[in-house]
Amino acid sequence: MTGFDPFGGEAINPSFEIARALDGEIVAGHHIVGAMLPTEFARSLPALDALLRRHRPALVVALGQAGGRAGISLERVAINLIDARVPDNAGDQPVDVRIVENAANAYFSTLPVKAMLAALREADIPAELSQTAGGFVCNQVFYGLMHRLARARRRVRGGFVHVPYLPEQARKFEDAPSLPMEIMIAATRLCVRTALTTESDLSYAAGTLH
Ligand code: PCA
């Protein structure tokens, strides 16, 4: 499980706080490793590669903060495009460039997003499916992850989940939605358990969109 370091002037990023909180937990017989990725276009995928090599995971759930979204946002599709509206933490702001040259335009998440949505709703946690992870570093990591998993010899499920602001972040913006940390941790644990225990659903028909 990965989260990102704080970006855009924030002091905290809930995605990494969740990964840190779940680090070391056992869920459905699997040991969770929670790690941080830098919110930098140049360094995020090398950092992901090092984690994949080191841990050889059975499942990869990458998390990111999506300020302004109201619920846990289960991303369906990663696109091969960067269009940064703000600079990353290294000051880079690529616009309209591909993540991987001569590769698929998009990949679907191979997480069972419908089953995860049902589990979250059952637990009364606000959640939604999302058709876009945006054009910033989160989508880059999502696309890079799916590209790697699609080419891996082992079948490893993976995908991306965006989370809202924490209440203390949302306070700075009028009417910005937020979720308490405990709810986000419970939600993410539930997502992991569901992904590890759900054999398949429609979204597991993995694949590339050309
Ligand atoms: N959210 C950003 C990048 C890091 C993060 O937590 C995004 O949605 O792209």
Image (tube, rainbow, N blue to C red):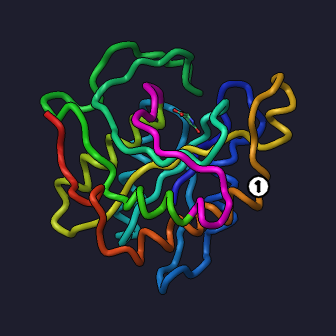
- What kind of element bears circle 1? helix
**Looking at the figure, which quarter contains the C terminus?**
top left
Q: What residue sits 28% from the left and 46% below the top?
A: 108
Is 38 located above or below residue 201 in the figure? above
Q: Is residue 180 magenta?
A: no
Q: Nearer the viewer, residue 98 or 73?
A: 73
Identify the residue shown where x is 36% and y is 72%. 58
Q: Position of residue 94 (x, y in %)?
A: 41, 16
Q: Is residue 125 magenta?
A: yes
Residue found 39% across the figure and 53% down from its top: 159
Determine whether 86 is above or below 164 in the image.
above
Residue topped by disc 1: 181
Indicate if the residue with disc 1 has its beta carbon within 8 Å of ligand 1: no
Q: Nearer the viewer, residue 147 or 133?
A: 133
Amino acid type, callout 1:
Met
Location of residue 197 by image quarter: bottom left
Any part of residue 187 in sight: yes
x and y, in percent, of residue 155 in the image: 22, 68
Dividing the picture into quadrants, the one containing residue 99 is: top left
Q: Quadrant of ligand 1?
A: top right
Give the residues in magenta: 120-136
Q: Is residue 24 above or below residue 138?
A: below
